[in-house]
């Protein structure tokens, strides 16, 4: 189920909201490939930390169950958006290659 940006703002901290804002269009389309990879890494680290522990330290996060699940689902959706953009760009790059070089890649 899609969540609104308002829901993101209610559940996430300000720095996390700023990261999530980068995962929405049109901003996502303007990020360079290295920035996309860095964004995906940051989101994954935060998501892994939202399972009840902060990523940087083994300190339990004091949140109720529904809020914690919402945080995790918002972060998972953001990672999916970034992954889809990375895959879309990969597909566009491969379709722009000359036909001969694609056949060589298939032959391995």
Image (cartoon, helix red, strand yellow):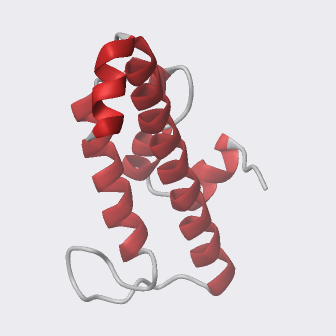
Quarter location, residue 98: top left
Question: Extreme right residue here?
Answer: 1
Q: Where's residue 104, x and y in %?
A: 28, 28
From the viewer's perspective, tell me whether residue 103 is left or right of residue 69: left
Q: Where's residue 33, x and y in %?
A: 28, 29
> Relative to 23, is 61 above or below?
below
Q: Nearer the viewer, residue 64 or 40?
A: 40
Query: Which residue is found at the position 40% from the left and 12% from the top?
Result: 96
Q: Nearer the viewer, residue 101 or 27?
A: 101
- Count every numbered label the image shows and give the total: 0
Quarter location, residue 106: top left
Kindly tell me whether residue 22 is visible in this rendering.
Answer: no
Q: Nearer the viewer, residue 101 or 79?
A: 101
From the viewer's perspective, tell me whether residue 20 is left or right of residue 106: right
From the viewer's perspective, tell me whether residue 9 is left or right of residue 85: right
> Relative to 19, is 57 above or below?
below
Query: Which residue is found at the position 68% from the left and 52% from the top?
Result: 7
Q: Where's residue 78, x and y in %?
A: 52, 49
Quadrant that contains the N terminus: bottom right
> Relative to 8, is 69 above or below?
below
Query: Which residue is found at the position 29% from the left and 33% from the top?
Result: 105
Quadrant that contains the C terminus: top left
Kindly tell me whether residue 82 is visible in this rendering.
Answer: yes
Q: Where's residue 44, x and y in %?
A: 36, 61
């Amino acid at each position: 189920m899609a969540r609104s940006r308002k829901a993101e703002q209610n559940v996430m901290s300000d720095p996390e909201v700023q990261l999530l804002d980068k995962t929405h269009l049109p901003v996502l389309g303007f990020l360079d490939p290295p920035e996309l990879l860095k964004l995906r890494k940051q989101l994954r680290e935060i998501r892994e930390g939202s399972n009840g522990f902060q990523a940087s330290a083994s300190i339990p996060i004091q949140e109720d169950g529904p809020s914690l699940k919402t945080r995790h689902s918002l972060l998972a959706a953001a990672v999916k958006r970034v992954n889809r953009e990375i895959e879309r760009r990969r597909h566009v790059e491969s379709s722009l290659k000359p036909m001969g070089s694609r056949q060589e890649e298939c032959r391995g």
